[in-house]
Amino acid sequence: MPVRLGPAGIPLSCKGRTIIEGMDDIISLGLETMEVQTVRMIAPQHFEQYWQAGVLANKTEFEMNIHGPYYSELLGNRVERGRSLTKIESTLQAAKTINARHITLHAGHYGEMGRGRAANEQLANVFAGIVDRVHEIWHDDEDIYPVFPWLKDGTPSKIGIETSGRQELWGSLEEVLEVVNHVEGTVPVLNIAHIHSRGHGSMRTSEDYGEMFDLVRETIGTKEFYCHFSGVEHRTGNAMHYTQIKKSDLNFEPLAEFIVEEGGWLDITLISDSPLLEHDAMYMLQNIEKARHKQLERKAREDRRRSLAAQTGRSAEEIKARELEIASARKQAATAEMKQKAAAKKSEEAKPEQDKAAEVSKEEKAKPKAKPKPSKAKKVEEKAEDNVFDFDEDDDDLF
């Protein structure tokens, strides 16, 4: 079950920005591959470092790969196709120089041709021509073998056709497999983030990955897979942009579980497209190691159950059921203990408030009660009562 991981480009943590320095950093991290990005334009001065990287890759058995231009119009008119193929030609020359195992290419928009058989047939013809051109470049001059020793002993780069992440772009998984199945020398590039987005969030469980890999194996009969992985934001069946894996609904754990539990037959290269590049490549590696540890722990438990079954005369299933009962009882006891601790903590937090309220109440009781002041109406009434026999002397004149 060979699994090779690496970033799409020079690592972010690399102090230098050359491919050679990037390879050194990748190897020091325990990763085994990278994908050089030639997505826009290749300048002549780049070929010196490409050749140096190819020599190093050949000596260390480091897997080099290369990505072609992002923007291609292989389903466009003759002018658009010619322009795209000219850009791709530079990538093919760079692939030979760098000793690339895979050359990843895009097809582009459906254009006026739309979906269907006609588009697939045209792309099959285009990619067949690209494969022929790779073979021509690989074997065009035997005198350069001392400079490029991998050309003599190795095989030409494989043309990788990448799945797309948007509805208006050619490249559903089924379309890619149909073309690859008809063109020898091509392989599907399974961009998991694109497949997930185009399927409205379809890659969620290890079973989903099992179905995908089985479909590829049954369609084109391969055990070798070249994949891209990243977190992704998507909407209405379209990828919006890549994100780090932890911030996406596309989790790597189910794929790691499938690789370890069911993928013993796989020979897989995983390229990190994440904005975090090598950091998420390391994150993927750690998840695969965790899945392996879980597998070993499970197998150890199963071996212990079989041993106990042989000693006690009970079946392994009975022992497993008993273990589950004990685990459930422990979980319930732990939950009850946590609830008790939470209640005790809440009681302790409430006690100072109660004590404070009691002190305030005690102080209020200790204070002498103030005599209530009579109301204004009562004062007037009392004054009137006091003056009942109080009259003026002039009142005698009434009688």
Image (cartoon, rainbow, N blue to C red):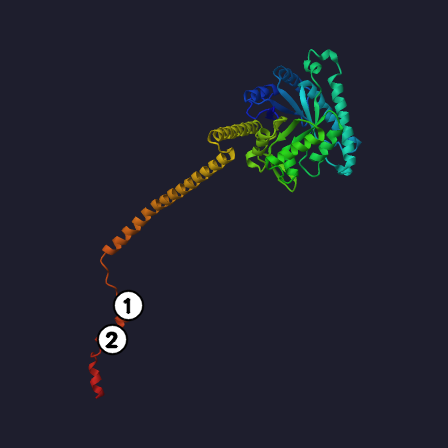
Question: How many residues crowd around disc 2 within 10 Å: few (fewer than 14), some, or many (20 or more)?
Answer: few
Q: Please, what is the three-letter code of the amino acid marked with disc 1? A: Ser
Q: Amino acid at mark 2?
A: Ala
The residue carrying mark 1 is: 375
Q: In which image quadrant can residue 152 be found? A: top right
Question: Residue visible at 36% across and 43% down?
Answer: 345
332 relative to 61, above or below = below
The quadrant of the picture occupied by the N terminus is top right
Q: Name the one closer to the observer, 345 or 254.
A: 254
Q: Is residue 384 left or right of residue 9?
A: left
Q: Quadrant of the C terminus?
A: bottom left
* Residue that numbered label 2 is attached to: 384
Residue in the foreground of this view, choosing between 154 and 279: 154
Q: Position of residue 262 (x, y in %)?
A: 60, 30
Q: Earlier in the sequence, mark 2 or mark 1?
A: 1
Q: Which mark is residue 226?
A: none
Question: Between marks 2 and 1, how big is the CA–CA gap?
Answer: 15 Å
* Residue 370, quarter of the rendered image: bottom left
The image shows residue 188, relative to residue 145, as above or below, that is below
Q: Position of residue 70 (x, y in %)?
A: 68, 30
Tag in front: 2 or 1: 1
Q: Give coordinates of residue 112: x percent, y percent.
A: 77, 38
Q: Is residue 295 in view?
A: yes
Question: Foreground residue, 399 or 242?
Answer: 242
Dot 2: element: helix
Q: Residue furthest bottom?
A: 399
Residue 70 visible here:
no
Give x and y (percent) for residue 391. 21, 80
Which residue is found at the position 26% from the left and 55% from the top? Answer: 364
